[in-house]
Image (cartoon, rainbow, N blue to C red):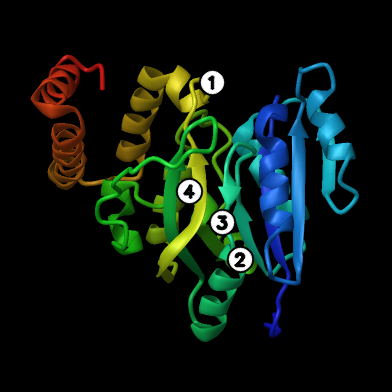
Amino acid sequence: MEVTLSPLVSIITPVYNGAQYLDDLIQSVLLQDYPHIEHVVIDDGSKDDGATVAILNKYSHLHWLSRANKGQYSTMNDGLQIAKGQYVCFVSADDILTTGAVRAAIDYLLQHRSFDGVFGITSYMDHNGIVFPFLVPFRGASLGFYQYFAHIAHCSLYVKAETLRKKDLFFNPALKYTGDYDWIVRMHLERCKVGFLNRELSRVRLHESQTSRKYKNDSFSELDVVRKKLRVNPLAYAVLSGVNIWTIRVWKTARLLNEAGLLGAVKFLFGFIFKKV
């Protein structure tokens, strides 16, 4: 496939009962300064009295459809099947793209034509859109370290659609919580060449209604199964993921010590010890 100077980029969004934040996402895509974007949105059978569909109907530029519920990862696969862009990025309905993200990613890929994709920095925000001073250790680590650090968010990852289809890199629809982890680790196993762009490309919204938060224990259990299936080295995982987690804990403790004093830091440590943080 010939790569043009401004190739079409497909932003693919699965949405289920997403009326609360969907407008913010759509606007963040509309405000991109890149000229050739299609925004594919699939409503996965929302049951919110038509609120999600009402928002989608407001935007004539969207390529969207609504159908019976199939699950998040099946919906993302459907989006990839119908996307027309040479490059794709999967962005959840409660997240946003940051200013200039698409242009920055595509400029990088046009300068590195042998690469299959590129990822950038992801920030985290609360339900009101206020950005957390959240440390992401090893955020520039190569794709091979993702299995240990999980430092790449799919909303900051732009990949050639042709690569995904040729290498059968679709999401595993049997997974409920860890399909993105499984997907990105398989990219590494398929020897995809993915670069790093040292700038913010997206923001992930953390809120209590997120599936990963509501079903945290189930998510951990599924992750164990996925790691074993993909033959992630258990010793390397224990060591490197442990270093990653403790780096975050130490940083949070230091920040709380600075902002809330010794009592705040002690409360955080007790919360961590008793699995509340």
Q: Where does label 3 land, which residue?
A: 98
Mark 1 belongs to which amino acid? Answer: Ser
Q: Is residue 235 above or below residue 270?
A: below
Q: Where does label 4 land, which residue?
A: 183
Spatial distance from mark 1 to mark 4, Cα to Cα?
Answer: 23 Å
Secondary element type, mark 1:
loop
Q: Residues within 10 Å of mark 4 (few under 14, many from 20)?
A: some
Q: Residue at horizontal 17%, vertical 23%?
A: 264
* 4 or 2: tag closer to the N-terminus: 2
Secondary element type, mark 2:
helix
Callouts 3 and 1 close, C-beta under 8 Å = no
Q: Position of residue 227 (x, y in %)?
A: 32, 39
Q: Is residue 134 above or below residue 263?
A: below
* 1 or 4: tag closer to the N-terminus: 4
Quadrant in the picture for residue 56: top right
> Foreground: 133 or 45?
133
Q: Residue at horizontal 43%, vertical 23%?
A: 213
Kindly identify which numbered label has been placed on residue 102: 2
Q: Position of residue 225 (x, y in %)?
A: 35, 31
Secondary element type, mark 4:
helix
Callouts 3 and 2 close, C-beta under 8 Å = no
Spatial distance from mark 3 to mark 2, Cα to Cα?
Answer: 9 Å
Q: Where does label 1 land, which residue?
A: 209
